[in-house]
Image: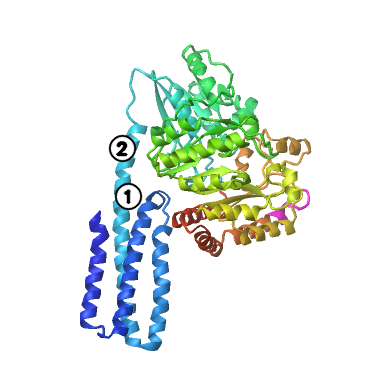
């Protein structure tokens, strides 16, 4: 590895030393600028190497180039400015600097090429080892439970883009709940191409947007008389529909009922419905992460469930309950210690929670990560109250927080009231952003377009707001009435939902298009305006500008690079063409 670091830079320094001894005039006015140029290059060179190594997961797993391109672009912009300046003073010296600059680019990119190739080789070896665990030969004396994570291949929403997906944590939990007397295999369509595999029992999970695909796979196994059990949020919200395609459904959280499902399966007495309870999260089961692919950039950890807010468009409260339940922070720390991946996504709907007790628990969690020197880079979902206590922000940053996802929805109070987003009312967004940036953390602001008060003017105004403020990463979606929400019930009663050919139309419920009739805009005007807003928000100019602003506001290169990579993922989703 050290050869990769040193060989190109050594050759470059030998070349420049030769140039100084042979061709550069031995005058202090020429030698000093030339030496300064070389020292600056050496600094940039190792900065690029260090940045690539620090962000190697993003470089290898999602093909990010920002970590090594940013340093050399900085070097290039300064160097070319100097070349122009020297040309006015001494054209020959300027030409010599230009030649050395071109040689420096060759050295730099040669080093990066060999470094990335080495990292890819290491990753491929790790992948082979990981796949041997995921697809290892199972005991012939045991029955096999096949868990499947389906993906809607006809859409381009965040849950369908491989760059923005996360391991199916729920299936990892089900695998951990399964007795050792069974073989457990996982087919994850985020990573794997589905191929029929024999199994004694099949378990599926699905969001609404990939429910149709789940039903397709379920039908394949049912036709072969293999029992299929389905869980997840869509089956919970649409149980009668799901039972048309599967043998049994688990309604709610699986921890309290999976043992019963297994027992009934062994007796060939599977019930149609199993009802999960809202359990205390002390001693929660640890997911079997060895079943997940190494290709995932982030490992996922859940530290709480439930939400008391009950926004009209959100299904979390209906699925996980109104009570905010938290795992003991000691249990979370123990789980984190056993995760090898550097990057962590806390998938809680609000890692900070609600009230002083929840806040103190978050403080203890962050302090524990610092004390144990876990050295994780992480991001989470939270609310604007994250900025209320600077101790929370500071400890989060010191423990490795690089980005917080905040559901801002709209800067317009009328729209917040319409969505029942009470937590955001009467809050100073801009002041919260400044506090969060101050500690080196980027703000991922999520905004919703398409509310009943939406007009062309309000959409353009919202877009201007996002562009002008300290929103480091931009996530914009269409308001979507998901089944089980108060919004869905209201729109259905008013006959405003346009796509009701279920289950095939569930494919459309991925938040990338309007599925209902708006009140103040016709759909064509809305779509044209939304396309214009997306073009402005996700232009390369905007993303580059946001990167520079994030770097300036946070003074943290890793944070800025994570923000840049995230914006590129959102751009790919927003500007992609639907199949």
Q: Residue at x 49, y 13 (%)?
A: 268
Judging by the rendered image, the residue that carries numbered circle 1 is 120
Whether pointer 2 and pointer 1 mark residues with C-beta atoms closer than 8 Å, the reply is no
- Local packing at callout 1 (Cα closer than 10 Å; few below 14, some 14-19, many 20+) is some
Judging by the rendered image, the residue that carries numbered circle 2 is 129
* Numbered marks: total: 2
Query: For residue 135, what is the image quadrant?
Result: top left
Give the x, y percent position of residue 46. Answer: 32, 61
Mark 2 to mark 1: distance in Å? 14 Å
Which numbered disc flags the more N-terminal residue, 2 or 1?
Answer: 1
The reply to whether residue 347 is in sight is: no
Give the x, y percent position of residue 185. Answer: 41, 28
Q: Establish if 382 lies above or below 574.
A: above
Q: Residue at x 25, y 75 (%)?
A: 16
For label 2, the SS is: helix
Give the x, y percent position of residue 477. Answer: 63, 49
Q: Residue at x 71, y 37 (%)?
A: 488
- Determine if the magenta segment contains residue 150: no
Residue closest to the far front: 391
Q: Residue at x 29, y 52 (%)?
A: 118
In this picture, residue 330 sits left or right of residue 95: right
In this picture, residue 439 sits left or right of residue 334: right
Give the x, y percent position of residue 212. Answer: 58, 35
Identify the magenta region.
519-526
Q: Establish if 301 lies above or below 143.
A: below
Judging from the image, the colouring scheme is rainbow
Q: Establish if 12 lies above or below 534.
A: below
Judge by depth and name the residue closer to the eye, 278 or 135: 278
The reply to whether residue 77 is in sight is: yes
């Amino acid at each position: 590895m050290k050869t990769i670091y040193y060989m190109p830079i050594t050759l470059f320094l030998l070349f420049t030393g030769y140039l100084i001894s042979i061709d550069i005039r031995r005058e202090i006015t020429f030698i000093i600028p030339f030496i300064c140029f070389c020292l600056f290059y050496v600094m940039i060179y190792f900065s690029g190497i260090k940045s690539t190594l620090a962000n190697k997961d993003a470089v290898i797993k999602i093909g990010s180039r920002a970590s090594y391109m940013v340093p050399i672009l900085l070097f290039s912009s300064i160097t070319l400015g100097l070349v122009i300046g020297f040309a006015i003073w001494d054209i020959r010296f300027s030409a010599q600097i230009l030649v050395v600059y071109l040689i420096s680019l060759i050295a730099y990119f040669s080093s990066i090429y060999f470094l990335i190739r080495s990292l890819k080789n290491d990753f491929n070896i790790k992948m082979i080892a990981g796949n041997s665990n995921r697809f290892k030969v199972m005991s012939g004396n045991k029955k096999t439970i096949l868990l499947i994570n389906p993906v809607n291949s006809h859409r381009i929403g965040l849950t369908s883009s491989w760059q923005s997906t996360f391991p199916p944590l729920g299936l990892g939990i089900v695998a951990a709940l399964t007795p050792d007397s069974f073989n457990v295999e996982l087919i994850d369509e985020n990573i794997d191409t589905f191929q029929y595999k024999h199994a004694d029992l099949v378990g599926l999970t699905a969001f609404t947007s990939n429910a149709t695909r789940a039903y397709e796979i379920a039908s394949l196994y049912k036709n072969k008389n293999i029992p299929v059990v389905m869980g997840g949020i869509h089956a919970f919200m649409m149980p009668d529909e799901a039972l048309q395609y599967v043998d049994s459904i688990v309604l709610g959280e699986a921890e309290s009922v999976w043992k019963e499902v297994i027992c009934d399966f062994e007796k060939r007495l599977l019930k149609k419905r199993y009802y999960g309870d809202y359990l205390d999260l002390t001693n929660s089961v640890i997911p079997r992460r060895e079943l997940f692919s190494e290709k995932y950039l982030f490992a996922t950890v859940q530290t709480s469930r439930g939400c008391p807010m009950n926004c009209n468009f959100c299904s979390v409260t209906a699925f996980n309950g109104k009570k905010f339940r938290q795992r003991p922070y000691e249990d979370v720390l123990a789980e984190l210690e056993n995760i090898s991946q550097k990057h962590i996504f806390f998938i809680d709907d609000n890692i900070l929670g609600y009230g002083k007790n929840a806040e103190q628990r978050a403080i203890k969690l962050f302090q524990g990560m610092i004390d144990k020197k876990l050295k994780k880079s992480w991001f989470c979902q939270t609310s604007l109250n994250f900025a209320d206590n600077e101790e929370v922000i500071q400890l989060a940053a010191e423990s490795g927080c690089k980005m917080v996802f905040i559901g801002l929805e709209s800067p317009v109070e009328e729209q917040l009231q319409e969505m029942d987003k009470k937590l955001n009312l009467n809050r100073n967004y801009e002041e919260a952003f400044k506090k969060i940036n101050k500690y080196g953390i980027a703000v991922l602001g999520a905004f919703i377009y398409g509310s009943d008060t939406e007009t062309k003017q309000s959409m353009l105004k919202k877009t201007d707001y996002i562009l002008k403020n300290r929103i480091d990463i931009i996530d914009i979606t269409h308001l979507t009435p998901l089944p089980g929400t108060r919004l869905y019930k209201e729109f259905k009663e008013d006959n405003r939902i346009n796509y009701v050919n279920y289950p095939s139309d569930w494919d459309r419920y991925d938040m990338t298009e309007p599925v209902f009739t708006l009140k103040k805009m016709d759909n064509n005007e809305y779509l044209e305006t939304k396309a214009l807003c997306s073009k402005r928000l996700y232009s390369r100019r905007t993303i580059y500008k946001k990167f520079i602003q994030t770097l300036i506001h946070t003074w943290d290169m890793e944070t800025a690079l994570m923000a840049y990579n995230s914006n590129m993922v959102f751009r790919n989703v927003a500007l992609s063409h639907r199949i």
